[in-house]
Structures are given as C-alpha cells and as structure tokens.
C-alpha cells in the first residue's frame, strides 16, 4: 500500500490544526483546530492500521483506536463548547486574549 | 528499509515549510486593518444583527444544546458496529456486556431528560 | 433443581475483570451517585431498582459460576447503598458525599487485596530489576507495583478531598449534584491511567480524567476566575492530548503495536528509522509534560490552580500528578529504558528548568494559591530526577514523592479552603498576616505543610526529597541534585515568608476583627488526617513507606 500520501495529508492537516491553535484568538476556532488535529491523527491511525494488516496483523488496532478517538473527540467538543458558552454568557466575548484576570 | 521511511521525513519537511510559509505569507501579504465589520461573525452573508434574531441573540442556544447531545449519543452508537461483528462468538456474555454499556447510555439519557436538556422552551 | 438446570450456562471468556476492580468500584459508585442525584424525589425508588438489578445479577453469577465471594460483595454493596439512600433520602448532598467517600474507601480496599496477591507473586523474583507481573485484559491493563501504589495514592487523595469539599462547596453555593460523581470519574481515569499497559488505554484514561477535571475546574460557574481556569485548562489540555495522541500514532506506526512494553521492545531492536522513534518520543514528552506541568509546558498551571475551587485544586495537584507521572514512568523508565541515551538528556534539562523556573516564579507571587501552583511546578521538577536516574531507586523515589506530595498539597489547599470559607475571597499573603495569633491551630497546620513542602529535615517532605535525590546521586547525576538543592533553597524562602507573615507579623491596621474560624467537622478531619500522615511519614514511619515503594517499583514487561 502506498502509505506516503495519507501520512503526508495527515501531517499537513495536523500542522493546520497546530497553526490554528497557535494563531487564532477566538476560542471556538481554537477548539475547531484541536478537532482538526484529532482528525489528522485518526487518518494516521487508520493508515498505520492498514499497513499493519498488510504485514499480516489480524488485529485491527488502528481502526479500533480511531473509533475511540472519534468518540472522545465528540465528548471533548461537548465539554469545550459548554465552557466557552459559559464564558460568553458572562463576558459577551470568546476572545482568549480577554481571559486575563489572573495575571499576577 | 530506510527508503521506506523517506516519505515520512519528507512529510516533516513539507509540514514545517507549510507552517512557515503560511505564517510568512499571511503576515506579508495580508494588510492588517481590523474593523468591526471584519471582526463580525460570518453568517452566510446575512448581517448578524442581535435584534432581529429570535430570542435576542444570534442563535438560540437550544440548537447548540440539542446538536451537542445528538452528536454525543450518535457517536457512542459507533461502538455497536465492531461489537455486532463478533456477537456470534461472544454469545450471551457479549449481550450482557453490551447491555451494561447501553444501560450506562440510558443513565446519561435519563440525566439529560431530568435536567431539562431536551425541553425546547 | 429444575429451575437451576434451566439457567443457560454462562460462557465467560477469560477476561480478568478483577484487574480493574478499583476502577469498576469508583466508576460504579460515580454512576450510582449521579443516578440518585438525577432521580430527585424518586431517589429511593431508583436506589431500589439498582438494588434489584444488582442482586439479580449477583444471584445469576453465583448460581452459574459457583463463586460466592464476588456476588456476595456485590449484593452487600447493593443493600448498603439502599440503606444509605433510605436513611438520608432528604439530604442528597450528604448522601452523595458519603457514597463518594465509601467508593474511595472501597477502591482502596480492593487495591489492598490486589496488593496482597501481587506481593505474594513477588517473593523469590529477581528484586534487582523491574520484575514483571501480568498485564491483563488483553494486554490493556497492568497490575504491577507502580499501578497499585499509584491507585492507592489517587484514592487516598479522593478520600481526603470529599470532606474538604463538603462545607466549602456549600459555602460557595457550588454544591451541585454532579460534584462528587465527577470527582469519582476523574479518579477512575487516574487509576486507569496509572495502570494502563497500552497506549489506547493511556489516551482514554487521560481523556476521562481531563474531561472531568475541566468541568470541576469551572465548577464555580458564577466566578469569572473559575471560568477562566476552565477555559485555559481545557484549551491547553485538549491541545496537549492531541500532541500526545500524534506521538502515540507514530509509535504505533513504527512498531506496529500499541502495547507499551511491546513498543518498547520493538523500539530498542529498531535499526533504521530512529528519526521517527525520536519524533514519537518528543511528542510523548510534550504530551506528558503538559499533564504533569513541566516547564516549558506549565503555562496553564498557575492560572488553573488559582481559579479552580480550592479543594479541587488540591485534588488536581495531588492525584492528577501522581497518575500522569505513573504513566510517564511506565512508558519511559519502564518500556523505553533501553533507549535512555536518547531521552534522559532531554528530561535532565527539563528537570533543571522546571525546578529553577518553578521556584523563582513562585517567589514573586502574591496570591497564595498561585504561589502554591508555581511550587507544584517546582515539585514536578524534583520528581523528574527520579526519571532521569532510570533505576529502581528512582522509580521508588518517584512513588514516595508522589504519595507524600499528595498529602502536603491536599493539606495546604485544605487550610486555604478553610480560610477562604470565612473570608469569602482568595487569600493573598497579606491576608495571612497575624493569623498565627488569632487562629493558632489552622496556622500551625499550614506551617507544618509548608515546612514539609520546603523539605526541612524532620518533615515528610524531606523524606520524599531524600528518596529522589539518593536515586539521582546513585545514577551519577550529582549536578542535577545540586540544582535541585539550590531550587529548594529558593523555594524555602517563599514558604517561610508565609510562615513569618502568619506568626511574626501583626494583623494589618484597619482590618476589622473577623469572625472566629468555624471549621466544619469534615474539613477539620481532612486536614488533621493529612497532617497526621505527614507527621507519621516524617518521623516514625519513613522506612515503612520507602520499603513499600521499593517493593512496588516494578513494571510489567
């Protein structure tokens, strides 16, 4: 199997996610970037799982792991959006630079 | 052996270049003149006006809540598929274990119900 | 007899559920507490329903497998929860707290039972190496010394947190029904993380504990600081989880296995693509570094520790650290030990940075909780010395350190919670001036915990520091130990500054006489228990603890 393409794609996607987390100031966009990173890892896991299957591994570890990542990612979005919403209700902003009450 | 992993090394180089390039290009090419209109939320070309939307906000929070609950319960169902493929081998034991899993799901559903998560008004 | 014959035979696959029995206890009690809270006025009916199902299940297992101990215990627990619910059906919070405390106590009991089986197997084994015991549940869970020791540490932390929380949460009006279930779920994740033998388990456990703690950090939802703490913890936590996950994916890609021990073996026999292995390890270090608050991945720590409700801060500082360090140990010192040339220099530098930065930044803080947050960073650095040593004494030192740190941290945050409860605000160091005159007992307790955190000889903190320093010296890292001592001296300055403010300075002018401190029974009990453990391990029992930790310093192979 030609593994390079999905792996490169996943790495690019991961970098887009990291870039988003580091550059975005809107908490919702940061959360979306984190989800991109998780999606990238999911692609990686499935690819590695297929590679392992090519080598004769009968246990689909990568694919099963991908399912867990999906489920946990969904839970993470739920908690994250709830926290962001809570912040928005009190401050009418979701800019993470405005969350600076506790600097010294 | 080493050649097999060459794409991975290439991938890291590309990834690094991509980030560096994105940062560079966006800082050089994009003039940074933020104004309130640019910073406003994009809603498919509709001007976001807090007054006109129902309930006095851009989006009724109810949508968000229901959507989130749907996603979480929806995704949990994904675990039923791998289980279904091996149900024959697991027989009654598998059924019992999945029963516990579904019971836990129902417990969270009961929680949502009692806390008013599914009430529309 | 005819009835018995009709029961279909239960084909139980060979799954050692007993391996995760503490997790099952914690999780089960958490679900139960949540259910009883959700049911509201129908609490008693819900409790009876649970009793019915549990009794039926236990009876079925007893009849079809001829076991009697496990079904008996399950039946007893089911009956017990029904009795508790019947007695306290009008006081839901008290019921919830009681269940949580019993859950933690039960998990400790189960772990003690596991320890008995484990230490029996240890006899005659080669004590000089990391002796292997089984990894169970398809290689997902390890029941070895590190896992068992950390499980006890985490459950003890939970057991102390429950009474510390009760009056505090009541006072701040954050005593909602989800509090104790979330605490139990977080503890489930932590104990699971400590005993993960597989990277899949590591990821799931980290997420279980993190998701619960994100919510707990923001539990005081009307408090802006608490919200901010939750947001920062969440964003950085989720980011670090994703990095850790990418590292795990790379490990899986290189070795073809997600089992930690197998991945370690595959790594060490690897010939060509060392680059991938190094990249994977770097990502793992970053991911674990965020969770354990190592410089430069500590940015979230002071904010989160300051903003979160105080008993939760104590629990986070103590138990999360113990669990994350246990998994960190298992992956690096346990599985990647053959590759130590590649990662010990990195951790050496990180340890030095963490100790110095934590201590120096703590000096300039005014808020006591924030100061303790930076001090927690410095303590993570001391723990890392045990990692860099990569020997059995190091592992044992880390375990000792984490257990003792648990009580130091819970105790000091507990006293702060007590003071906050009266003053209705976060404590700055100035607010503590003259405290020793007015309330000598809490001030004395806080002084005891702070002296111990500073590592003054004669305290438990000294025992902990000695254990890791000894391992560091043995492994030839004298320079690192010197840095640690320098850092301890700097750190002693700000701990003693608080003590001086409490005992040597007067109450500031213009401060009205405060109401006398009225500690609740629970809080006093939690603090007194922590203090008693501190004194015991500092003076009489250190050898017992170190001996236990020495026995526990093993991984599955």
Image (cartoon, rainbow, N blue to C red):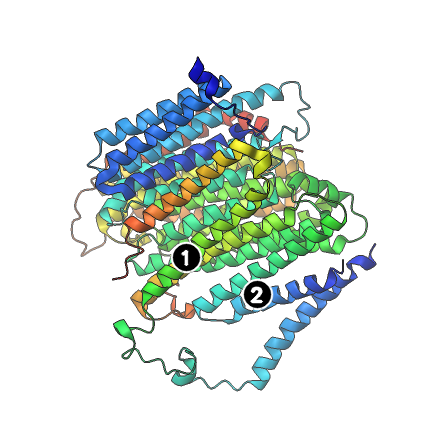
Kindly identify which residue carries mark 2: A18
Q: CA distance from mark 1 to mark 2?
A: 28 Å
C476 relative position to C61: left or right = right
Q: Position of residue C239 (x, y in %)?
A: 52, 59
Select label 1 or label 2 by which is in front. Answer: 1
Vertical placement of C491 versus C107: above or below?
A: below
Q: Nearer the viewer, residue C354 or C59?
A: C59
Are the two marked residues, 1 and 2, in contact with CB atoms closer than 8 angstroms? no
Helix, strand or loop for disc 2: helix
Q: Nearer the viewer, residue B6 or A48?
A: A48
Which mark is drawn over residue B70? 1
Chain to which the residue tagged by mark 2 belongs: A
At a point 54% along the width and 49% down the height, the residue shown is A68
A26 relative position to B51: left or right = right
Q: Position of residue C314 (x, y in %)?
A: 39, 44
Q: Position of residue C71 (x, y in %)?
A: 43, 22
Vertical placement of C17 versus C256: above or below?
A: above
């Amino acid at each position: 199997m030609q593994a390079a393409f999905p792996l490169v794609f996943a790495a690019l996607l991961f970098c887009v996610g990291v870039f988003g987390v580091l550059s975005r100031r809107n908490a919702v966009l940061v959360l979306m970037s984190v989800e991109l990173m998780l999606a990238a890892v999911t692609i990686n896991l499935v690819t590695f799982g297929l590679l392992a299957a090519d080598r004769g591994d009968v246990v689909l570890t990568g694919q099963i792991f991908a399912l867990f990542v999906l489920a946990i990612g969904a839970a993470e979005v739920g908690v994250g959006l709830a926290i962001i919403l809570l912040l928005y209700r009190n401050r009418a902003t979701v800019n993470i630079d405005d969350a600076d009450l506790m600097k010294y | 052996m080493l050649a097999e992993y060459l794409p991975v090394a290439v991938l890291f180089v590309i990834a690094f270049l991509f980030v560096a390039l994105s940062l560079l290009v966006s800082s050089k090419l994009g003039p940074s003149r933020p104004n309130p209109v640019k910073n406003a939320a994009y809603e498919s070309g509709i001007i976001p006006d807090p007054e006109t939307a129902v309930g006095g906000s851009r989006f009724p929070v109810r949508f968000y809540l229901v959507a989130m609950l749907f996603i979480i319960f929806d995704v949990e169902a994904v675990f039923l598929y791998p289980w279904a493929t091996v149900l024959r081998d697991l027989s009654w034991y598998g059924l019992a274990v999945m029963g516990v899993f579904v019971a836990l799901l129902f417990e969270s559903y009961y929680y949502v119900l009692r806390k008013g998560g599914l009430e529309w008004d | 007899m005819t009835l018995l014959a009709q029961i279909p035979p239960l084909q139980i696959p060979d799954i050692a559920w007993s391996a995760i029995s503490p997790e099952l206890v914690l999780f089960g009690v958490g679900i139960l507490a949540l259910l009883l809270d959700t049911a509201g006025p129908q609490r008693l009916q819900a409790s009876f329903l649970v009793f019915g199902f549990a009794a039926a299940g236990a009876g079925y297992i007893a009849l079809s497998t001829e076991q009697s101990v496990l079904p008996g215990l399950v039946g007893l627990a089911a009956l017990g929860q029904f009795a508790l619910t019947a007695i306290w059906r009008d006081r839901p919070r008290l019921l919830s707290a009681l269940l949580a405390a019993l859950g933690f106590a039960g998990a400790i009991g189960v772990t003690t039972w596991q320890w008995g089986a484990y230490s029996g197997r240890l006899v005659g084994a080669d004590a000089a190496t990391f002796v292997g015991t089984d990894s169970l549940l398809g290689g997902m869970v390890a029941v070895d010394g590190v896992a068992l020791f950390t499980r006890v540490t985490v459950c003890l932390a939970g057991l102390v947190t429950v009474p510390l929380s009760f009056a505090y949460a009541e006072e701040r009006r954050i005593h909602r029904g989800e509090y104790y279930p979330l605490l139990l779920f977080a503890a489930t994740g932590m104990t699971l993380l400590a005993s993960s033998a597989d990277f899949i388990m590591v990821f799931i456990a980290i997420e279980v504990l993190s998701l619960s703690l994100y919510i707990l950090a923001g539990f005081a939802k009307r408090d802006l600081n608490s919200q901010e703490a939750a947001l920062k913890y969440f964003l950085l936590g989720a980011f670090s989880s994703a990095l850790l996950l990418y590292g795990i994916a790379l490990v899986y890609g290189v070795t073809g296995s997600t089992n930690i021990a197998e991945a370690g073996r595959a790594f060490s026999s690897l010939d060509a693509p060392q680059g991938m292995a190094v990249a994977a390890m770097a990502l793992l270090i970053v991911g674990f570094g965020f969770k354990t608050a190592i410089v430069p991945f500590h940015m979230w720590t002071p904010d989160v520790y300051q903003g979160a409700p105080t008993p939760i801060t104590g629990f986070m500082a103590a138990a999360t650290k113990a669990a994350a360090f246990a998994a960190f140990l298992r992956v690096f010192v346990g599985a990647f030990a053959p590759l130590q040339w590649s990662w010990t220099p990195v951790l050496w530098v990180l340890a030095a940075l963490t100790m110095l930065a934590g201590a120096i930044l703590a000096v300039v803080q005014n808020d006591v909780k924030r100061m303790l947050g930076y001090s927690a960073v410095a303590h993570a650095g001391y723990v890392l010395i045990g990692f860099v040593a990569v020997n059995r004494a190091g592992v044992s030192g880390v375990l000792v350190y984490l257990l003792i740190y648990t009580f130091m941290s819970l105790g000091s945050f507990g006293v702060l919670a007590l003071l906050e409860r009266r003053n209705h605000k976060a404590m700055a160091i100035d607010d503590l001036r003259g405290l020793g005159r007015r309330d000598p007992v809490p001030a004395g307790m806080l002084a005891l915990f702070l002296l111990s955190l500073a590592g003054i000889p004669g305290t438990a903190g000294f025992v902990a520091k000695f254990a890791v320093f000894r391992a560091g010296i043995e492994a030839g890292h004298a320079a690192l130990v010197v840095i640690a001592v320098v850092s301890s001296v700097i750190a002693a300055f700000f701990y003693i500054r608080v003590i001086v403010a409490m005992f040597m300075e007067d109450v500031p002018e213009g401060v009205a006489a405060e109401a006398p401190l009225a500690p609740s029974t629970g809080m006093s009990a939690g603090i007194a228990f922590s203090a008693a453990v501190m004194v015991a391990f500092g003076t009489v029992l250190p050898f017992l603890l170190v001996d236990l930790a020495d026995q526990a310093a093993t991984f599955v192979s």
